[in-house]
Amino acid sequence: QVQLQESGPGLVKPSETLSLKCSVSGFSISSGYNGAWIRQPPGKGLEWIGSISHSGATYYSPSLNSRVTISVDTSKNQFSLKLSSVTAADTAVYYCATRKGAWLPADYWGQGTLVTVSS
Amino acid sequence: DVQMTQSPSTLSASVGDRVTITCRASQSISSWLAWYQQTPGKAPKLLIYKASSLESGVPSRFSGSGSGTEFSLSISSLQPEDFATYYCQQYDSYSTFGQGTKVEIK
């Protein structure tokens, strides 16, 4: 059974770096699963942050490109997200998601984790 | 950037109704469009990919159509569990979501 679980601090201070991990189970990323990060501010719509292939190739949203780093650790079966210089506008539920073979659309999603940016 | 515009923003309907949601892209995205369903507090669920391909396990009352810049999601006979928010997502040029359509009980 495919499962994804996001983890990381629920509170981040302004100007600091948001760091999240996505642990996957039920499959091996190295078998061809690509990852994605999507976020959703409270009460608002979905925003694609970026995607990564199982081999580590990445592409990011142009609006977030300068602040985002997505990585993959196949030995730990994890995807990771780093978002630097955060502001209150980065407060959101952050989802990791995956799909085998294609980059998108994601067909398996984690439950999401709320990250609040506040001092 | 490719902008995605959904309409309507809110749709009021009754159980058994046929409903249609539209999604318009600011430039051609061929058929690289997906539809998701989201209920409160839950992650989105993939319904349709490549504009008209039904994701495995999704009821056949859901269907998608369109190509280029105009797309639609239809639910043939609305069920109680279908009251939710629906999002389109383009994945032709990077990726962008529409703003969402809330389907509420009339």
Image (cartoon, rainbow, N blue to C red):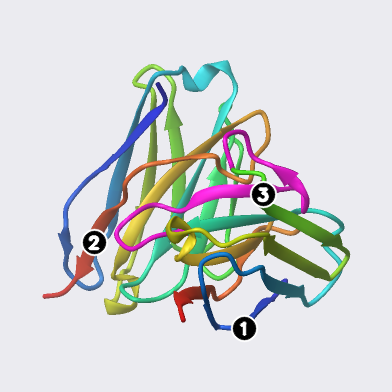
Measure how far apart labels 1 and 2 are at the Cα level.
30 Å
CA–CA distance between discs 2 and 3? 29 Å
Kindly indicate the quadrant of the structure image that contains residue B83. bottom left
Q: Residues within 10 Å of mark 1 (few under 14, many from 20)?
A: some
Q: Is residue B10 left or right of residue B52?
A: left
Q: Which residue is mark 1?
A: B8
Callout 3: SS: strand
Evaluate whether residue A35 shows in this view: yes
The disc label shown at residue B48, or none: 3
To which chain does the residue with label 2 belong?
A: A
Which chain hosts label 1?
A: B
Residue that appears at 57% across and 64% down: B16
* Residues behind callouts 1 and 2 on a single chain: no
Q: Is residue B42 magenta?
A: yes
In the depicted view, which residue is nearer to us: A53 or B16?
Answer: B16
**Which kind of residue does numbered mark 3 sit on?**
Ile
Mark 3 surroundings: few (<14), some (14-19) or many (≥20) residues within 10 A: many
Describe the element under mark 2 as helix, strand or loop: strand
The residue identified by callout 2 is: A115
Residue A66 at least partly seen:
no
The answer to which of A112 and B23 lies nearer the viewer is B23
Q: Which region of the structure is painted magenta?
A: B38-58
Spot occupied by residue A72 in the image (x, y as percentages of width and height) = 45, 32
Q: Is residue B74 above or below residue A78?
A: below
**Crowd band around label 2 with a 10 angstrom C-alpha radius: few (<14), some (14–19), many (20+):** many
Q: Marks 1 and 3, Cα distance to the nearest angstrom?
A: 19 Å
Earlier along the polypeptide chain: callout 1 or callout 3?
1
